[in-house]
Image (cartoon, grey):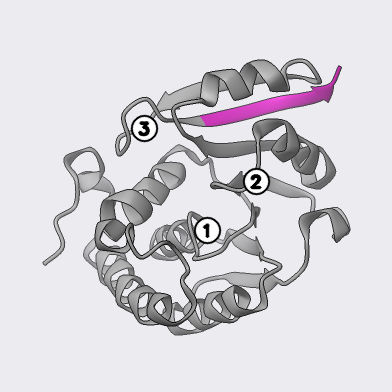
Amino acid sequence: MTIVPDWLAGDVSRETLNDLERFHDLFLKWNAKINLVSRSSAPELWNRHIWDSAQVWSLAPEASHWADFGSGGGFPAIICAIFAKNAQRDTRFSLVESDQRKSTFLRTAIRELGVNASVLAKRVESLEPLEANIISARALSPLSDLLEFTAQHSARDGQALFPKGELWQSELEDARKTWTFDCKAHSSHTEAQAAILQIKELKRV
């Protein structure tokens, strides 16, 4: 039985955990074929990827449309969609992933888990504006580039949730040269010195 971390224990129902375990098994099966994440990090799938993605969900307000850029192996979007499904929220997820093999995996996971999501197999910059209430991206681009995507695809009242590693403060400083925004940095539960940046009120300088 998978052990839920203490900081998340009250937010994971039995149904959610069952779905997460199903996703875990499906992911490992596909990762052996198309390398969704590095082989070295696969044994740490729960803490490094699944619970790390669950942190994003724990910070998200209710929303009608959630867009995730560079969805890759489904982090954080599929994990968040599982939580949304079992919380009986109506949030619709748009997963943007230009790699066709990864897109096929994402569509398979969506179908097998029954989550409210679809895959856009294109590059972010080529899409028509998505008007999303929440935008997320994990390990995709520097913050300045992510904010460019956010400006293009966010709804008027939208916000972004970006997990960042130990260099998040320097990325924040660089981004402020081009953008003004409100940012709250939430300390990561799964990686020391990492943070999830919650960004609102985005405007170009």
Residue 129 at x, y percent in the picture: 85, 53
From the image, tell me which residue sits under label 1: 77
Query: Which picture quadrant has residue 100?
Result: bottom right
Front in this rendered view, residue 34 or 93: 34
Query: Which picture quadrant has residue 124?
Result: bottom right
- Per the rendering, the mark at residue 202 is none
Magenta-highlighted residues: 197-205
Residue 190 at x, y percent in the picture: 30, 39
Name the amino acid type tagged 1.
Answer: Ala
Q: Is residue 62 magenta?
A: no
Q: In the rendered image of this protein, does residue 6 appear above or below residue 173?
A: below
Left or right of 192: which side holds 93? right
* Helix, strand or loop: magenta stretch: strand
Label 3 sits on a secondary structure element that is loop
From the image, tell me which residue sits under label 3: 188
Disc 3 or 2, which lies upstream in sequence?
2
Front in this rendered view, residue 65 or 108: 108
Name the amino acid type tagged 2.
Answer: Ile
- C-alpha gap between disc 1 and disc 2: 10 Å
Q: Is residue 157 visible?
A: no
Quadrant where the C terminus sits is: top right
- Per the rendering, the mark at residue 135 is 2
Left or right of 201: which side holds 117? left
Q: In the rendered image of this protein, does residue 75 appear above or below residue 173?
A: below
Front in this rendered view, residue 87 or 136: 136
Label 1 sits on a secondary structure element that is helix
Question: Answer yes or no: do the residues labelled 1 and 3 have beta carbons within 8 Å?
Answer: no
Label 2 sits on a secondary structure element that is strand
Disc 1 or 3, which lies upstream in sequence?
1
